[in-house]
Amino acid sequence: MEDHLMTYFMAEKQEALLFMALGAAALVVSFYLFKAESVYKGMIYPLIIVAAIQLVVGSTVYFRTDGQVEELAALLKDDPEKYKVEESQRMERVIKSFRVYKGTEIILLAIGIALTIAFREYNPWYSLGIGLIIESSLMLVLDLFAEKRAHEYMQFVVGS
């Protein structure tokens, strides 16, 4: 039973590392765009904002996971029923939050697409749209993976 718990949280930890790496890469690209005389400077804004989110969320998940796993594994061993109740309540909140994340990412993706259509010539609004498309679609895909893992883990929790 503990294998499901470990599998879920190790995958969360791996994705957290990916979040941090993507955030760092976005900052590097933003720095390059800032220094270069590029028509894509408008991408800097969504890149930096989402990079900050990726770095904060990624590091938060990464650094709290080991302690969280220890606590949950002990609770599962000592009081499986309490584990089931508390963890299923927590996971319900996690799963509900994905609706908000996906909705926000889809709206930002649509705004990015609209900006690239409305401002076809290369200007800051066009490149802002490109940045929104890149970051919102990337975050949407990662959140879809995370949501699928959350549902699978929730099935384990409820069935435990």
Image (cartoon, rainbow, N blue to C red):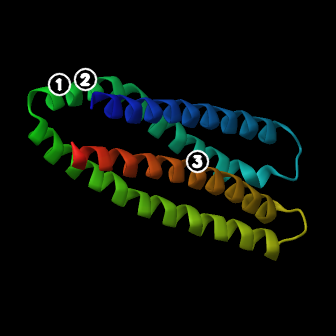
Find residue 22 and report its image quarter.
top right
Left-right relation of 21 to 69: right
Amino acid type at image mark 2: Glu
Crowding at dot 1, Cα within 10 Å, few <14 / some 14-19 / many 20+, comes out as some
Mark 3 / mark 2, whichever is N-terminal? 3
Amino acid type at image mark 1: Ala
Residue at the spot 48% in from the left edge and 35% down from the top edge: 58
- How far apart in space, not on screen, are marks 2 and 1 (Cα)? 6 Å
Q: Which residue is mark 1?
A: 74
Q: Which residue is mark 2?
A: 70
Q: Which residue is mark 3?
A: 50
Can residue 28 be seen by looking at this rendering? yes
Mark 1 / mark 3, whichever is N-terminal? 3
Image x and y of residue 7, in percent: 40, 31
Along the line of sight, which residue is nearer the eye, 119 or 134?
134
Along the line of sight, which residue is nearer the eye, 10 or 1?
1
Residue at the spot 56% in from the left edge and 37% down from the top edge: 19
Tags 2 and 1 touching, CB below 8 Å: yes
- How far apart in space, not on screen, are marks 3 and 2 (Cα)? 30 Å
Can residue 59 be seen by looking at this rendering? no
Q: Secondary structure at mark 3?
A: helix
